[in-house]
Image (tube, rainbow, N blue to C red):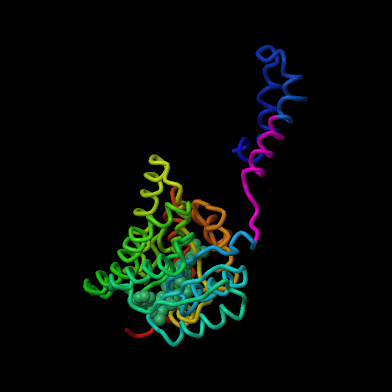
Amino acid sequence: MALLLRPGAALQRLFSSSPALFPTMGLLQKILIPVLGLVLAFCFYSSRENFKPEMLKGKRVIVTGASTGIGEQMAYHLARMGAHVLVTARTEAKLQQVVERCRALGASSARLVSGSMEDMATTRQLVEVAEAELGGLDMLILNHVGKSYFNYFDGDVGHVQKLLNINFLSYVAMTVSALPMLKRSGGSIVVVSSMAGKVGFPFTVPYSATKFALDGFFSSLRQEFSIQSVNVSITLCILGFIDTENAMRAAADVLLMSPAPKEECALEIIKGGTLRQREVYYRYASTKLPLLLRDWAAELLDLLVRQRYRPERLRAA
Ligand SMILES: NC(=O)C1=CN([C@@H]2O[C@H](COP(=O)(O)OP(=O)(O)OC[C@H]3O[C@@H](n4cnc5c(N)ncnc54)[C@H](OP(=O)(O)O)[C@@H]3O)[C@@H](O)[C@H]2O)C=CC1
Ligand SMILES: CC(C)CCC[C@@H](C)[C@H]1CC[C@H]2[C@@H]3C(=O)C=C4C[C@@H](O)CC[C@]4(C)[C@H]3CC[C@]12C
């Protein structure tokens, strides 16, 4: 434990307790350890490129589920950064407004494709528009989710299947269709997932299944890209509770926690994708830190989570 918390002090204690074994310890302590520390710090910071909004200028980006919530906010950030934005969802009227706002915010171009992700024709059309009108694709942001319920699992297998089609299979289909373009540009795939795709929470059984599936598929695919030297990054985004209209309506009464803002969340996703990070955790303290408990004290994590729920406030199904 001491080695984890104060490695310098722990090493010092270890070495100073057996001077005969380490005749050059004085030298080691005074010079080598500080130098090693400096080298490690340099490697760590120099490998982490800083994000700059200019990185997105002129980049061709598809954002799915962009008519509302986090997807809509990502479209606006990308527009401000001067990207070419192609947004999609089912509600054409809403998408039209998003496109207009993107143009006003300074997008290099903004267009839409409306349609359901249950339908493979939508996937095909999106990729065709990117190819024909943008001449390729640099970033694919997969963000849409089908409507589900926030309540006890009701046994409806048909709903699980439908949600898997929308939240998981369409992500696979989009990836397969867009991959040739992404390989050409050395681009990025960004997959928006959730803490509910890493840990089992109550009242989101079908949704959680679809998010766990995304982790399995994309983490495995990332390994294959690495073996085959495919220069396409995959960023999996692990989000906590975010203040989008739909999430607030569904869960705010039941959850004893405050939601994080969708605007900031959208920006963190874009930053992570642009820097080709393996995973994004937003917010860090309520996602990454609880996950440290998952593998070592799962029961404790489950208990802490249940304490943040008020099941008596669930709406009658
Ligand atoms: N908000 C939160 O607390 C959290 C959200 N997340 C994740 O963040 C992402 C965005 O969430 P959020 O912004 O809250 O979601 P919203 O419910 O606000 O937006 C969902 C989007 O998906 C679109 N959509 C729904 N059904 C379909 C369909 N069949 N075909 C195509 N598009 C569809 C909707 O548009 P339309 O209805 O017009 O089709 C809308 O644009 C999701 O992946 C979600 O899992 C993760 C953790 C927490
Ligand atoms: C360890 C804890 C401090 C963290 C717990 C975080 C939990 C409570 C957070 C993490 C992910 C969140 C859910 C989510 O991903 C998406 C949606 C869809 C939306 O329409 C309705 C709300 C819902 C179910 C969120 C509810 C709250 C969840 C379970």
| Residue 277 showing in the rendered view | yes
How many numbered marks appear?
A: 0
Q: Is residue 49 above or below residue 205?
A: above
Residue 111, compared with residue 60, is above or below; it is below
The furthest residue to the bottom: 93
Quarter of the picture containing the N terminus is top right
Residue at point 58%, 63% (across, down): 268
* Foreground pick, 174 / 10: 174
Image-based side of 270 in relation to 113, left or right: right
Residue located 62% across and 72% down the image: 80
Quadrant (top left, top right, bottom left, bottom right) of the C terminus: bottom left
User: Above or below — where is 83 with respect to 24?
Assistant: below
Residue 158 in the image: state x and y as whole percent. Answer: 22, 73
Q: In which quarter of the image is residue 313?
A: bottom left
Front residue of this view, candidates 130 and 293: 130
167 left or right of 231? left
| Range of residues picked out in magenta | 36-52
In the image, 147: left or right of 107? left
Residue drawn 42% across the image and 64% down it: 196
The rendered magenta stretch, by its main secondary structure, is classed as helix
Position in image of residue 292 (x %, y %): 50, 51
Q: Quadrant of residue 89?
A: bottom left
In the image, residue 176 lies in the stretch drawn in magenta: no
Q: Which of 141 and 146 is in front in this view?
A: 141
User: x, y (%) of residue 267?
Assistant: 58, 66
Where is residue 69 shown, x and y percent of the image? 50, 77
